[in-house]
Image (cartoon, rainbow, N blue to C red):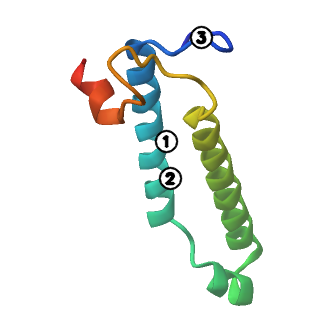
Amino acid sequence: MQHATQGEPLTRRQTLIVLEELYSLVLKLEQLRRDSPPFQLIAEQGSDDEKKLAEEWQEDYKKTSAQLWHRLAIDEPVDIRCGPAPSCLELLSGC
């Protein structure tokens, strides 16, 4: 996706693309949480393979979480021609 340059507000289309990417990342994080291994049991009784899988899960979760925070782009301005500080619902409504 092409990002707005520093200081330039995101267009409505760019905002919608970012929201879609954020939603996908949230869904991925939720699925990872559902699939999380039983860490305490693995730490106490797990084999080396189980411990390795648990470490890989943690790395994947950390990576996806970092992507989510990066894509939030809180410091990027949003085009607010529709009024002061529109909510996501106002952006989606096409005002």
Which quarter of the figure is the N terminus placed in?
top right
Image marks 1 and 2: residues in contact by CB distance under 8 Å: yes
The residue pinned by badge 1 equals 25
Amino acid type assigned to the residue bearing label 1 in the image? Leu
Q: Quadrant of residue 81?
A: top left
* Secondary element type, mark 2: helix
Which mark, residue 8? 3
**Mark 3 nearby-residue class (10 Å; few <14, some 14–19, many ≥20):** few
Amino acid type assigned to the residue bearing label 3 in the image? Glu
Amino acid type assigned to the residue bearing label 2 in the image? Leu
Mark 3–mark 2 Cα distance, whole angstroms, equals 30 Å
Position of residue 50 measured from the top left corner of the image (x, y, whole percent): 67, 71
Q: Given the current orientation, which residue lies at the most extreme right position?
A: 48
Which residue is rendered at x = 62% and y = 54% of the image? 61
Q: Quadrant of residue 14?
A: top left
Q: Is residue 45 left or right of residue 35?
A: right
* Secondary element type, mark 3: loop
Label whose residue precedes the other's in the sequence (3 or 1): 3
Q: Is residue 14 left or right of residue 42?
A: left
Which residue is rendered at x = 44% and y = 56% of the image? 31
Which residue is rendered at x = 73% and y = 83% of the image? 43
Which residue is rendered at x = 68% and y = 14% of the image? 6
Position of residue 59 measured from the top left corner of the image (x, y, whole percent): 71, 54
